Amino acid sequence: MSREYPEHPLVGVGAIIVDKDRRRILLIKRGREPALGRWSLPGGLVDVGETLTDALRREVLEETGLAVTVGPMVETLDRIICDDAGRVRFHYVLVDYLCTVGADEPLGASDAEEARWFEIERLGDLEMTEATHEVIAKALTIASQEAEDG
């Protein structure tokens, strides 16, 4: 199955990984299209027979070398990118989850050029999609609510 010009939407997962103090977010620099060179959430496609959370743990481990604890689902969204002729070049249905991780330092691997922590205040300076900014903001709200509740 080709990711480019697919016959049907592909299902992917993303991890909004927040440090224990909720001051930093772990991002990866995309090593391939779509969004080549942009900062993004770690994640990737779900394999046949794999649950969403299993796929997420596998993808984060492949891209960052870190094991995550998967928390609540934050958002489900479409990522549809058309070419200049209007044909659908990429079509993903993405399910993003709030995740936590220990104090380990990430290593960019797989299709991630780089993986590193960013102070939340610096996120506005990074080149990433508007949808990525929005899902991170929503995840931070959920994380703050969880911290207040328990």
Image: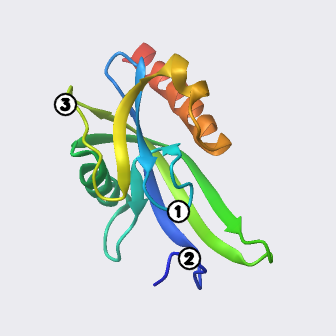
Give whichever of discs 1 and 3 has the lower sequence position.
1
Quarter of the figure with residue 18: top left
Q: Position of residue 114 (x, y in %)?
A: 35, 43
Q: Position of residue 65 (x, y in %)?
A: 21, 46
Residue at label 2? 4
Which circle's residue, 1 or 2, is located before the other in the chain?
2
Element type at mark 2 = loop
**Residue 32: image location, x then y, percent:** 46, 61
* Cβ atoms at labels 1 and 2 below 8 Å apart: yes
Q: Nearer the viewer, residue 48 or 37?
A: 37
- Distance from label 1 to label 2 (Cα)? 9 Å
Residue at x-position 67% and y-position 41%: 130
The numbered dot on residue 104 is 3
Q: Is residue 49 visible?
A: yes
Say which quadrant the N terminus sits in: bottom left
| Above/below status of 7 relative to 89 | below
Residue on which the image places disc 1: 33
Is residue 57 toward the left or the right of residue 146 in the image? left
Residue type marked 2: Glu
**Spatial CA span between label 1 and label 3:** 28 Å
Disc 3 element: loop
**Label 3 vs 2, first from the N-terminus:** 2
- Between 45 and 149, the residue placed more toward the observer is 45
